[in-house]
Image (cartoon, grey):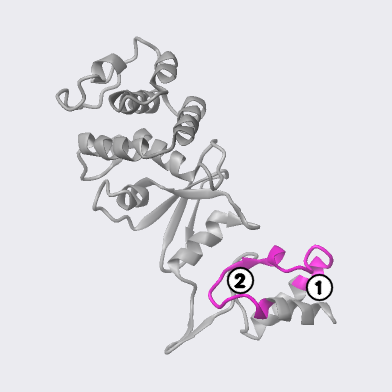
Amino acid sequence: MSIAQAVQQSVDKIPAGQVFGYRRLDDYARSPDAVIKAISRLVQEKRLARLSKGKFYVPKKGLLGAVKPSDSELLRSVLYKNGRLRGYITGPSLFNKLGLTTQLPSTITLAMNSARQRKEFGTIKVKTLQTRAPIDESNVALLQYLDVLKDIKMISDADINEVLRIMRSKIADLSSSERDMLVSLSLEYYSPQTRALLGLLLKSSSLKGSQELKASLNPTTIYKLKLDTKRWPQMDKWNIR
């Protein structure tokens, strides 16, 4: 069987609308040039469509012609590389998903271990922010929770006290090992203000980890967030005003 035939067989197994790259094809590691040539021919024959450099999809057939991949599939193509997760949704889209605001952004923000960039896929716009924290399937939700605390002043049309109430509930629902990881991530990768807020939430729920966070903070630094002292009576102990 020729490389072209093998590529065609592999492509036939890929669901319509699913984005893939050269490495998805078994013969790429053995004969990359031949695979690239075969894919280029399929694009010319309109049996494949090119999404961006090195990324393709089998067009779906709709009433008005070929249909592009869904928004979720387009996002997946950015978030995963060679089957490995390399980013996650953050910013306004995350705030909306967690029920912290009703605002829906026109651009989806992704945190990634790569340089900042902007992408546009016609139906959606994406911008990426660089993060130093390691990203994998097991810690995405934890990084998202920490991002909320980090960006709490930037959440549009939201009461900061209500945001903290919701996040306290979500953090309390984590397992003890997940909370330990949450504390570790905050200590290594997040700002003192983020650690102070996390410490306040843990302490107000009588959960462990707050002492370690307290020890990491400068006792003379004040965090101005205008919290309600009645709802957060322990805020002064964390220098939150």
Segment colored magenta: 11-35
Place of residue 136 in the rendered image (x, y in percent of width and height, measured from the top left)? 56, 45
For the C terminus, the quadrant is top left
As drawn, the label of residue 56 is: 2
Place of residue 235 in the rendered image (x, y in percent of width and height, measured from the top left)? 25, 20
Whether residue 92 sits left or right of residue 216 in the image: it is left
Looking at this rendering, what residue extends furthest in the bottom direction? 63
Residue depicted at 57% across the width and 39% down the height: 134
The mark tally for this picture is 2
Q: Is residue 33 magenta?
A: yes
As drawn, the label of residue 134 is: none
Label 2 SS:
strand
Query: Which class describes the residues within 10 Å of circle 1: few (<14), some (14-19), or many (20+)?
Result: some
Query: Which class describes the residues within 10 Å of circle 2: few (<14), some (14-19), or many (20+)?
Result: many
Is 4 located above or below residue 115 in the figure? below
Q: CA distance from mark 2 to mark 1?
A: 16 Å
Amino acid type at image mark 2:
Phe
Whether residue 239 sits left or right of residue 78 in the image: it is left
State the residue in front, 122 or 19.
19
Is 202 located above or below residue 63 in the figure? above
Residue depicted at 24% across the width and 19% down the height: 234
Amino acid type at image mark 1:
Ala
Residue depicted at 55% across the width and 78% down the height: 16
The image quadrant of residue 23 is bottom right
Q: Is residue 142 magenta?
A: no
Residue depicted at 28% across the width and 35% down the height: 153
Place of residue 130 in the rendered image (x, y in percent of width and height, measured from the top left)? 51, 41
State the residue in front, 17 or 48.
17
Whether residue 48 sits left or right of residue 121 in the image: it is right
As drawn, the label of residue 34 is: 1
Label 1 SS:
helix
